[in-house]
Amino acid sequence: MRSIAVALAVARKDLTSEWRTRELVPALAQFIVLALVIANFGFQIDSHNAPAIAPGVLWMALVFAGLVAFGRAFASEREQSSLEAMLMTPASPAAIFAGKALAAALLLVLCEAVLLPALALFFGVPLSFDVVSAVLLATVGMAVLGCLFAAMVARVRARELLLPLLTLPLWIPFIVFGGQAVQVAMGGSGGTGNTSGLLIDLDILFVVLTSLTARFVLDD
Amino acid sequence: MTSGITRYERGAIAAVALMLVAAGFIFLYAPTDALQGPVQRIFYLHVSAAIAAYGCFAVVLIGGVAYLWKENVAADRLARAGAMVGLVFTTVTLVMGMIWAKPIWGTYWTWDARLTSTLVLWIIYAGYLMIRRLADPGRQAARFAAVVGIFGFIDVPVVHFSVTWWRTQHPGPVVINDALPPQMLIAFFVTMACTLLLAAVMIAIRYRIEVLMDQAAERVAPAPIVAPTEVGSAR
């Protein structure tokens, strides 16, 4: 399929550019460690309360790291006016968008590869398969939605202000179910129920809606 | 226009009169609740305002989809009007709910699924109005807002079904469950009909304001200035 080839090429371009400059992921990794340090002072972490607080810290750090990662994905294109150039090619806007979202999601996964071990190390919580799968499932939906709104706000005034305002409320479902899954996996109490199934449902819903609307956001 | 009152004024007068009729049903016709006392009378307007807000956000959704499909400016104006009126009714719902919650629950706010999702609804549509203001007026603002309106509507069923999906403190659906005596039911349906009409009149008036604002904007800038997107033109 041509669109898939385009998407993969765009994703590769973004990842190559990040590999050459190495600015986003190291900065975000540092930000994540700082978030853990601040959480330590904010919550007075000790061995008793750490398992109860760790899930909240995880999602806080992830959400704000995600906002920065997705904001950068389109900010760099805007600075170079390169998105317009890409849109002038016969490639479909949806495929270009998919490539950018894929690259941004992979960069966020790299940040998660720092966040989860750091959380396990500093907060002494177990890192089970359930935690990793909940975070990865949430990343899919968060990435498509975050990139859609990042593409939008890259073209408007006050973009740094607007991205969290639009994105955070719609990320809440992922935080609700992802948070529940992580709480249960880290030994806290929480609802039972099939949270992975719900996260997959949400991912499908947001991927479908985004693929239908991305064209209107990019091709403007 | 010069002779007498406009149809918008007539609509506004009718809506206000009907809201007074609804107030009559709420305070004079409906019986006082045996357990909650007079505070229960908040229920009629609280639930009606919530339903009106759902309706307004459905208008935003339909207007947004219609705009993306046909590039119809009228559909976009309708969506704009719906978002603003819907935000007003969501505010009314939240504030009246909080006034009710204080004597009944002992607190204005609790992080209950229904309360939280309604607050999120408010934030989503406040963001909708925000992107309208910050995007380039015209096609871009309309397209971006339509996309936000489509995604934002996801929260409406979440708000509605939150009381059945999660264990909440918020009372469940009493109207469809036949938990109300007939007099309360009549008072509720009268209030709901009047509130929906009020919302419709408000949307119509807001729509007219949007038309006039669009015309004024066209008069100021006859041709939309489209900057050629060449390198360096951003400066």
Image: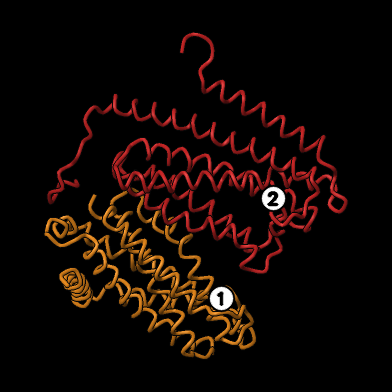
Chain colours: A orange, B red
Q: Do tag 2 and tag 1 residues touch (Cβ < 8 Å)? A: no
Chain where mark 2 sits: B
Q: Is residue B167 left or right of residue B139?
A: right
Callout 1: SS? helix
The structure residue drawn at horizontal position 38% and vertical position 84%, both measured from the top left corner, is: A113
In the foreground, B205 or A125: B205
Question: How far is the residue under mark 2 from the one under mark 1?
Answer: 36 Å
Residue located beneath label 2 in the image: B97
Q: Nearer the viewer, mark 2 or mark 1?
A: 2
Q: Is residue B211 left or right of residue B18?
A: left
The structure residue drawn at horizontal position 48% and vertical position 41%, both measured from the top left corner, is: B82
Q: In the image, is residue B174 above or below residue A134?
A: above
In the foreground, A158 or B100: B100
Chain where mark 1 sits: A
Q: Tell me which amino acid carries mark 2.
A: Gly
Q: Position of residue B66 (x, y in %)?
A: 36, 45
The quarter of the image holding the N terminus of chain A is bottom left
Give me the disc on residue A41.
1
The structure residue drawn at horizontal position 43% and vertical position 41%, both measured from the top left corner, is: B79
Q: Position of residue A63 (x, y in %)?
A: 44, 69
Give me the disc on residue A219.
none
Q: Position of residue B213 (x, y in %)?
A: 38, 29
Q: Position of residue A144 (x, y in %)?
A: 35, 66
Near mark 2 (Cα within 10 A), the count class, few <14, some 14-19 or many ≥20, is many
Near mark 1 (Cα within 10 A), the count class, few <14, some 14-19 or many ≥20, is few
Q: Tell me which amino acid carries mark 1.
A: Phe
In the foreground, B179 or A64: B179
Q: Residue furthest top?
A: B3
Q: In the image, is residue B79 above or below residue B156?
A: above
The structure residue drawn at horizontal position 22% and vertical position 75%, both measured from the top left corner, is: A15
Query: Does mark 1 fall on the same chain as mark 2?
Result: no
Callout 2: SS? helix
